[in-house]
Amino acid sequence: MAPKADHDLASSDLDHLIGYNLKRVYMIFIAEFRSAWAENGLSTRSYSALSLMIAKPGITQSEIARTLGIERSGLVAIIDDLQTRGLAQREAVAEDRRVQALSPTDAGRTAYQNASEALKSNEDRLLSALSPTEQSQFRSILSKLRNAYEGDVS
Amino acid sequence: MAPKADHDLASSDLDHLIGYNLKRVYMIFIAEFRSAWAENGLSTRSYSALSLMIAKPGITQSEIARTLGIERSGLVAIIDDLQTRGLAQREAVAEDRRVQALSPTDAGRTAYQNASEALKSNEDRLLSALSPTEQSQFRSILSKLRNAYEGDVS
DNA sequence: TATTGTTATACTCTATAACTATA
DNA sequence: TATAGTTATAGAGTATAACAATA
């Protein structure tokens, strides 16, 4: 675990950089995710891949990679992990024998459901430091930035 | 470079998670930082450490570690890096021979100045996707979250 | 030719644990 | 005993480059 930051020390223009503040806040959320899932150890990447499979059963590794904005080579270990845990499966596709359709198992859907609920309440707890108005501003701002600078097209 | 995200693919409840959106936006800013500094290769960590030394010459590695919220063992490589580049120096302290006072060199101050200006204009460019009001809301929200969940004490 | 999944490899960031020299 | 700096080591997360099978 990273040590808590000590704020009365040398605060510099670092605190005026959006990028730095973004990183620190991201770290807060990541730590939260991990502490909520220390039990089963589902990583953020595995959770994300599972989420996409549930949203679109039959999705391929390349599609997941493109959606998450990572290289497809990175997906191999993620899917291996989910398969080892019995949460997802690869299936051959007759029409295109290069690809393998990915889908969640029943256990995968259950695990995802549980993870999502815990995650949701953890996020809500973190966000309680903000007013309801600020919470929706936060969502809107993050969304705007993603739309402006990511792949494009809704 | 990570591939651009493809958004018309399987958008799932992932997009409703603040943590996920935070990560994606953080990635946008990180990529920006790196592309702005590809020339000299100053890492975010080195930049941060340099910033703290300039704000408080004589600061120690342990103080920097606490301020940045990372382990002090991680500072060794960072300071080595800055020293190798001729941007910072370690100096013995008579009163406490365990510590070494860190300070920027003249070259360090200059490099930092240049980095800061480029960084600032890059951030401004990214933030131009937001209205001035949204920009200040964004700063305020990130700040509130840090104050609520980090070390404490201003 | 282009794409999918895969492997091998390496780099960045970070943590843990232990050591030493001081205090 | 406690702290500062250090080393060794390991683990995420990610990228690049190449290859075989298939389109």
Image (spheres, coloured by chain):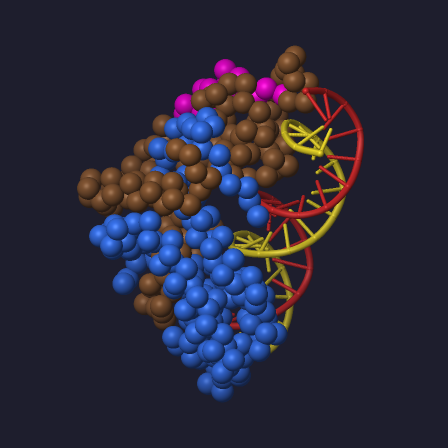
Chain colours: A brown, B blue, C yellow, D red
Residue sitting farthest toward the top: A94
Q: Is residue A135 magenta?
A: no
Q: Is residue A101 magenta?
A: yes
Q: Is residue B4 above or below residue A108?
A: below
Compared across the picture, whether A149 is left or right of B2 comes to left
Task: Compare residues A7 and B35 and report the one nearer the observer.
Answer: B35
Q: Could you tell me if residue A106 is visible in this image?
A: yes
Residue B117: quarter of image: bottom left
Q: Nearer the viewer, residue A149 or B14?
A: A149
Q: Is residue A41 visible?
A: no
User: Where residue A105 sits in the image (x, y, percent)?
Assistant: 53, 17
Q: Which residues are magenta?
A: A100-114
Image quarter (top left, top right, bottom left or bottom right) of the C terminus of chain A: top left
Q: Main secondary structure of the magenta part?
A: helix
In the image, residue D21 lies at what x, y percent?
76, 23
Residue found 27% across the figure and 63% down from its top: B154
Q: Residue at x 59, y 28 (%)?
A: A61
